[in-house]
Image (cartoon, helix red, strand yellow):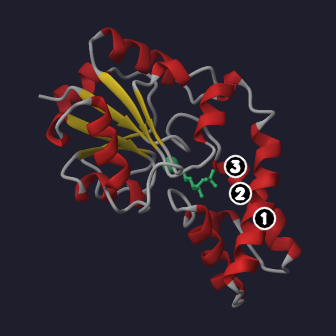
Amino acid sequence: EIKGLLFDLDGVIVDTAKYHYLAWKELAEKLKIPFTEKDNERLKGVSRMRSFEIILEIGGLELSKEEKEKYCTIKNNIYLEYIYKLKQEEVLPGVNEFLNDARKKGYKIALGSASKNAGVILSRLMLTDTFDAIIDGTKVNTAKPDPEVFLLGAKELGLKKEACIVFEDAKAGVDAAHNGGMKAIGIGRKENLPNADICIPGLFHITIDDLMNQL
Ligand code: BG6
Ligand code: MG
């Protein structure tokens, strides 16, 4: 029986992918690396450092660890300028309703995100108290598709992994759920998330009961 719901943040709760993109784009331009919206798809769900390494690969550039860290900090500062302006209305359609309904029905809810900025994002969206547990990039050592973030989420909810399902918009995240022995609800297009157990365009016009009936 499913008792816990584990949510990715970026692309599931809030559309921050566009701000990640704008920040990486600004950095890529400084480095004279061509970087398109299509390239950005590859960065979804991936850690900050790994994202930068993918951009360097695109540009055929190699940098030292120190330089990479310096540029990742620059990118994050650009990103944070957008995040500090994030508005509550930028929560994705249906998310608040879906979460409130699930909470009322007794489900435990955790965040399972790669982002080190999850705390500030949830607080900007007034969602901090909606989550019974918050696992983010500051708490995990291994990035998705490793299941660590979701296994820790289940643990902090006091639930067995078999009692949890994952909501993800990234292939790496769907794989992380499966690697942890959990089912994954894909948020987005089926062609981008072929492995998801169910795929829906978003959390609007759907309830947890509807999903449970489909699983
Ligand atoms: C993931 C995003 O949620 O978090 C990635 O999908 C991002 O695009 C990663 O790189 C790390 O986020 P942050 O905020 O710590 O740079
Ligand atoms: Mg995501």
Q: Is residue 103 above or below residue 196?
A: above
What amino acid does circle 2 point to?
Tyr
Q: Which residue is mark 2?
A: 21
Q: Are marks 2 and 3 in contact (CB under 8 Å)?
A: yes
Crowd rating for badge 2 (residues with CA inside 10 Å; few <14, some 14–19, many 20+): many
Q: Circle 3 — which element? A: helix
Residue 159 lies, in percent from the top left, at: 20, 32
**3D distance between C-alphas at marks 1 and 3:** 10 Å
Residue placed at 53% from the left, 49% from the top?
Answer: 138
Crowd rating for badge 3 (residues with CA inside 10 Å; few <14, some 14–19, many 20+): some
Residue placed at 49% from the left, 39% from the top?
Answer: 12
**3D distance between C-alphas at marks 1 and 2:** 6 Å
Residue 58 lies, in percent from the top left, at: 66, 82
Q: Is residue 205 above or below residue 188?
A: above
Q: Which quarter is ligand 1 in?
A: bottom right
Q: Are marks 1 and 2 in contact (CB under 8 Å)?
A: yes
What numbered label is drawn on residue 13? none
What numbered label is drawn on residue 18? 3
Q: Circle 2 — which element? A: helix
Residue 119, can we see it? Answer: yes
Residue 1 lies, in percent from the top left, at: 11, 28
Horizontal relation, residue 162 to residue 42: left or right: left
Residue 139 lies, in percent from the top left, at: 47, 48
Horizontal relation, residue 55 to residue 50: left or right: right
Residue 191, can we see it? Answer: no
Query: In this view, which residue lies farthest toward the top?
Result: 104
Q: Which residue is mark 1?
A: 25
